[in-house]
Image (cartoon, coloured by chain):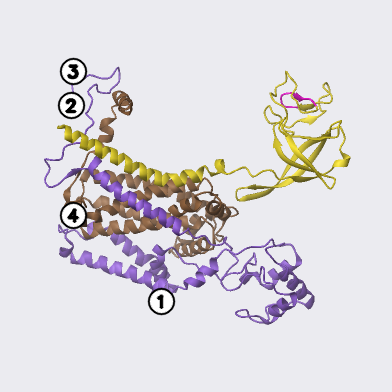
Chain colours: A purple, B brown, C yellow
Amino acid sequence: MHRGKGMKFVGDSRISADRKPNIPKDYSEYPGKTEAFWPNFLLKEWMVGAVFLVGYLCLTIAHPSPLERIADPTDTAYIPLPDWYFLFLYQLLKYTYASGPYNAIGALVIPGLAFGALLLAPFLDRGPERSPAKRPFAVGFMLLAMAGVFYLTWESAAHHDWEASKKQGAIVEGADIDKESDGYKLMDSSGCISCHGAELTGGAGAPSLIDTGLSPEEISKIAVKGQGAMPAGMFKGTDEELKTLAEFVSGLSTK
Amino acid sequence: MLTKLYDWVDERLDITPLWRDIADHEVPEHVNPAHHFSAFVYCFGGLTFFITVIQILSGMFLTMYYVPDIKNAWESVYYLQNEVAFGQIVRGMHHWGASLVIVMMFLHTLRVFFQGAYKKPRELNWMVGVLIFFIMLALGLTGYLLPWDMKALFATKVTLTIVESVPLMGPALKTLIAGDPTIVGAQTLTRFFAIHVFFLPAALFALLAAHFLMIRKQGISGPL
Amino acid sequence: MSKHNVSRRQFLNYTLTGVGGFMAAGMLMPMVRFAIDPVLSADKGGDYVATKQKVGELTTEPTRVDFSFKQVDGWYESEETNTAWVYKTDDGKIVALSPICKHLGCTVGWNTDKTNPNQFFCPCHYGRYTKDGMNVKGTPPVSPLDVFDTKEKDGILYLGQLKPHGEA
């Protein structure tokens, strides 16, 4: 390209009047089978990308993204689980020396050391060798860390009750509940909603109270004597109040 | 016709060198799967970037319906997934993409690690890459809360408890992230939204730019 | 450079554009369809809303009828209120006019301008309409007031879709 004196510009701009030819560089003189990024290699890359995209779109169609029911802070029985890529941390915090009084060790020290070492790997492994066979320590530590992460993730996934976690988060058909009614206020004061939820749609430990199909008599029996996981004697009010509550629950429906 | 238009712009702005700078670089034999099939391990970085592009695009489109507000967040997500045409696919792209990006990035990191490609002179690029890894994890974490479903709320409560357990500045840090010392609610959601949609992506763009610039400057690491 | 080389490069460029276009389309098609959904979803409309106005009480003098209806705006459902000016024509037909001025969207009132009695009057820019909703020439509005579909059921007035004058 022409530089310096005698250079021609387009108009009064600083754009050179000489055009650079718009053709790829020639790499044929380079050693080995080097090829141009554009268009030769990019075409191959994009073909891989296109196949990948089709698979990806099929995944989104075959598996709709999960959406659990709307957040209900009153449901204390819910057992949360993080996304799969945080499961190893979640599992780590279950062990004695990484939880309770040692929580800081599990939550900060161990992950901090691991990720810190990852970040500073170039300065910890300073030898000139690149081949994994000649870097036993670096490769060994990495394999150890990976084994740890895989083991913890597997442990956490294997011991998780997936059925229950699917159920506890499922979207339940709700009903229009009059929260000002005497019946609802009684449910609130008797502690019903701490298990059955503020929308009475149930939770991890208790079924939905909507569309039970039970008569008021049956409900008052359950409220006093309990059923399944529900202990007896939950309701402590008067008979009058029990009747109001039972009629309220019996009348809950999605209609 | 297109050539004429290109020449017209090129004459005025000299754009050929700009994009030829990006387009023209060599791809050596040892990273080309067409010559050595085992070179497919070099694809993971590119695929990570591809999914990142999908994440950015689908995220932009999702905000057309989504509201970061505890009363409407869940309703709007439910609406966009079930009522809007292709909503399931667009949300699916964002949801599954978040997982895929972690998988691809993990594989990319392992490739670089086991090949010792982070050694001199590429130390800085490795560190930028690890920072990108952290940003991606943080994006996954903050994005988790946004649909405001049971999982979102309770998983975030756990996260915040972990943050609180940091010695000395734990409680302050938690309040900073959650927006309130005790409640995980409206202010937490808007904060997580802002972090997920503006702060982290801004950091991500800067780091990605640095990552790519360094690759171009130093070239890809040689064969083992 | 030989001719063969050029055509090979062209071929590569065309396939590259093709594959790139396929990827862009695959990525963007769902997203764009997602974004333009409100444009393409058919207008449901056509629901009649009950007002509190008894049809028997309507006179030839326009009366203000407030009514409320349930509005579904995406995921957001709300109770909205709206207003109509309703009267009976001499041959007993019910006319319900929208109070929204066709000029710039202010609210018109009946008979509020003392100098022009028995007309709808918009206080913002002094737009005027005759009783049948036609805009008075020489005032700012350029088209007549919109008209509600009306229906009578059990002696109660029901209002439907809002339509441009002349189509109701």
- Amino acid beneath label 1: Thr
In the image, is residue A81 part of the stretch drawn in magenta? no
Q: Is residue B22 visible?
A: no
B2 shown above or below A91? above
Residue linked to disc 1:
A96
Mark 4, Cα crowd under 10 Å, few <14 / some 14-19 / many 20+, is: few
A150 shown above or below B135? below
Residue linked to disc 3:
A6
- Res A120 quadrant in image: bottom left
Q: Which sits earlier in the primary sequence, circle 2 or circle 1?
A: 2
Q: Nearer the viewer, mark 2 or mark 4?
A: 4
Q: Quadrant of the N terminus of chain A?
A: top left
The span shown in magenta is C122-130
Residue linked to disc 4:
B36
Q: Residue at x 86, y 34 (%)?
A: C92
x, y (%) of residue C146? 72, 32
